[in-house]
Amino acid sequence: MKILCGCTAALIAVLTLGGCSDNTEPAQNDTQAQNDALAQDDTDDTAESVWMTDFEAAKAKADQEGKDLLMDFSGSDWCYWCQRLDEEVFSRQGFIDEAGRDFVFVKIDFPSDKSGQSQALQQQNDRLARNYGIQGYPTIILARPDGTEYARTGYREGGPDAYLDHLQQLRQER
């Protein structure tokens, strides 16, 4: 068995536990026009899309349906661990069906290519990252319908079933 030097072991720990990071400076502004633009970002051409991008609309839906929020802070087009989590867990229909009983899904994305996001969506995401103190990606936050965080996690190995078990454990501990 080979022993890693302290620097290598620390780097592996940061990449495994901390995920990816981004040092973009958040923008500030929140108006009704921005909220209207956010609602447009939620319309996806694919009927199976369950991930909302408008945080206020997601909170209202969670409150109406008696569910919690599952917020995915992601760097969808550049973050390796974000892509793995999406591919292995979040895009799986079994996960969506099962977790969708308890959660409203919210994607808070920070892609390198922002051409598919409105300015209002980018500003909302920057504000949310600041408010929740996001320091790395992926960061998964579980919150009550009003947005109050009660658990935080990230990428975990094991696929959809293991991730569902993990989410249920976190939910029970709230």
Image: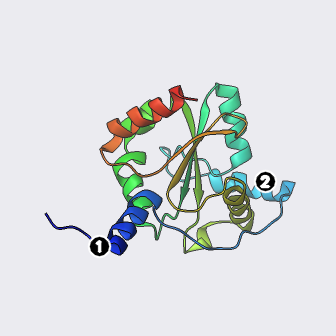
Q: At 60% from the left edge and 47% from the top edge, which residue is drawn? A: 52
Q: Is residue 40 above or below residue 105?
A: below
Residue 50 image offset from top left, x and y in percent: 53, 43
Label 2 neighbour load within 10 Å: few <14, some 14-19, many 20+: some
Residue 45 image offset from top left, x and y in percent: 53, 53
Left or right of 31 on screen, residue 113: left
Left or right of 174 on screen, residue 27: right
Image quadrant containing the N terminus: bottom left
- Lower sequence index among marks 1 and 2: 1
Nearer to the camera, 23 or 87: 23
**Residue type of the residue flagged with mark 2:** Asn
Residue 34 image offset from top left, x and y in percent: 80, 59
Instruction: Give the Cα distance between marks 1 and 2.
Output: 49 Å
Q: In this view, does 157 lie above or below 117?
A: above
Whether pointer 1 and pointer 2 mark residues with C-beta atoms closer than 8 Å, the reply is no
Label 1 neighbour load within 10 Å: few <14, some 14-19, many 20+: few
Nearer to the camera, 25 or 65: 25
Total numbered labels placed on residues in the image: 2
Residue 18 image offset from top left, x and y in percent: 47, 60
**Residue type of the residue flagged with mark 1:** Cys
Image quadrant containing the C terminus: top right
Which numbered circle lies on residue 104? Answer: none
Q: Is mark 1 on a helix, strand or loop?
A: loop
Q: In this view, does 57 lie above or below 61?
A: below
Nearer to the camera, 29 or 144: 144
Q: What element carries label 2?
A: helix
Q: At 39% from the left edge and 40% from the top edge, which residue is drawn? A: 163
Picture quarter containing residue 73?
bottom right
Which numbered circle lies on residue 5? Answer: 1
Which numbered circle lies on residue 35? Answer: 2
